Image (cartoon, rainbow, N blue to C red):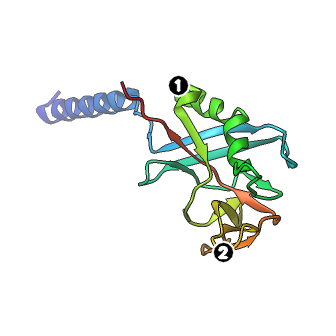
């Protein structure tokens, strides 16, 4: 073989070796995006009924340190605060096994997961692929009968607490001290 052919073969072998090496690398998962298949169990909490649902959830870590759902995961008959000032939706999110499912996926303890409804607009959300308005956690300042929400086109407003809206929860991995 002539020198040019030998050089081309060597060059080709080097490129094939580099491609093989690159294809065997295992890339680290993006810790800023968490994709989960969740089972939202059926529950009745203080007169609010939740249907069992299987959902595909994508959570993205925001600047506030919380992983916010990209979509509304389920619809709620209402977002209300009972006489003990408990947020019923947050109670459902924390007590329904959702924390356990998230913790299992991340390989940590359920006690290290805090789940709640976001307190500010994180943009337009979708429910089953369609733009959907959704609840924010805090009650509207002017009236206990009205709650904050984000419209399907993105602006924040308020509406009657008995209205049906989507819920786009967020979770945070708790920090351990000591």
User: Mark 1 packing: few (<14 Cα in 10 Å), some, or many (20+)?
Assistant: few
The answer to whether residue 72 is above or below residue 26 is below
User: Mark 2 packing: few (<14 Cα in 10 Å), some, or many (20+)?
Assistant: few
Contact (Cβ within 8 Å) of mark 2 with mark 1: no
The answer to whether residue 157 is above or below residue 18 is below
Between 10 and 71, the residue placed more toward the observer is 71
Which residue: 81% across, 63% down?
164
- Whether residue 128 sits left or right of residue 12 in the image: it is right
Which residue: 60% across, 75% down?
155
Q: Residue furthest front?
A: 83
Which residue: 61% across, 47% down?
116
Kindly indicate the quadrant of the structure image that contains residue 51.
top right
Q: Position of residue 16 (x, y in %)?
A: 31, 31
Q: Position of residue 67 (x, y in %)?
A: 52, 47
Q: Position of residue 31 (x, y in %)?
A: 44, 39
Which residue: 14% across, 31% down?
2
Kindly indicate the quadrant of the structure image that contains residue 44.
top right
> What whole-number distance in Å separates the C-alpha atoms at marks 2 and 1?
42 Å
SS at mark 2?
Answer: loop
Q: For the N terminus, which image quadrant?
A: top left
- Mark on residue 62? none
SS at mark 1?
Answer: loop
The answer to whether residue 30 is above or below residue 24 is below
Kindly indicate the quadrant of the structure image that contains residue 92.
top right
User: Which callout, 2 or 1, points to the residue nearer the camera?
Assistant: 2
- Whether residue 24 sits left or right of residue 154 in the image: it is left
Reading the image, the residue beneath label 2 is 142
Q: For the C terminus, which image quadrant?
A: top left
- Whether residue 69 sits left or right of residue 172 in the image: it is right
Query: Which badge, 2 or 1, comes first in the chain's sequence?
Result: 1
Reading the image, the residue beneath label 1 is 107
Between 42 and 153, the residue placed more toward the observer is 42
């Amino acid at each position: 073989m002539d020198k040019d052919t030998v050089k081309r073969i060597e060059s080709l072998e080097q490129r094939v070796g580099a491609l093989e090496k690159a294809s065997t690398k295992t890339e680290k998962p993006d810790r800023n995006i968490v994709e989960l298949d969740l089972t939202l169990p059926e529950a009745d909490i203080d007169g609010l009924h939740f249907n069992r649902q299987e959902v595909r959830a994508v959570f993205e870590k925001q600047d506030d340190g919380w992983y916010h759902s990209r979509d509304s995961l389920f619809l709620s008959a209402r977002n209300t605060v009972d006489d003990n000032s408990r947020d019923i939706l947050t109670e459902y999110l924390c007590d329904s096994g959702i924390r356990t499912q998230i913790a299992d996926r991340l390989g940590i303890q359920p006690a290290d997961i805090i789940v709640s409804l976001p307190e500010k607009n994180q943009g337009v959300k979708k429910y089953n692929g369609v733009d959907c308005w959704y609840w924010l956690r805090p009650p509207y300042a002017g009236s206990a009968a009205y709650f904050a929400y984000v419209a399907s086109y993105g602006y924040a407003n308020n509406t009657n607490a008995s209205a049906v809206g989507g819920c786009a929860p967020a979770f945070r991995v708790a920090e351990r001290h000591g």
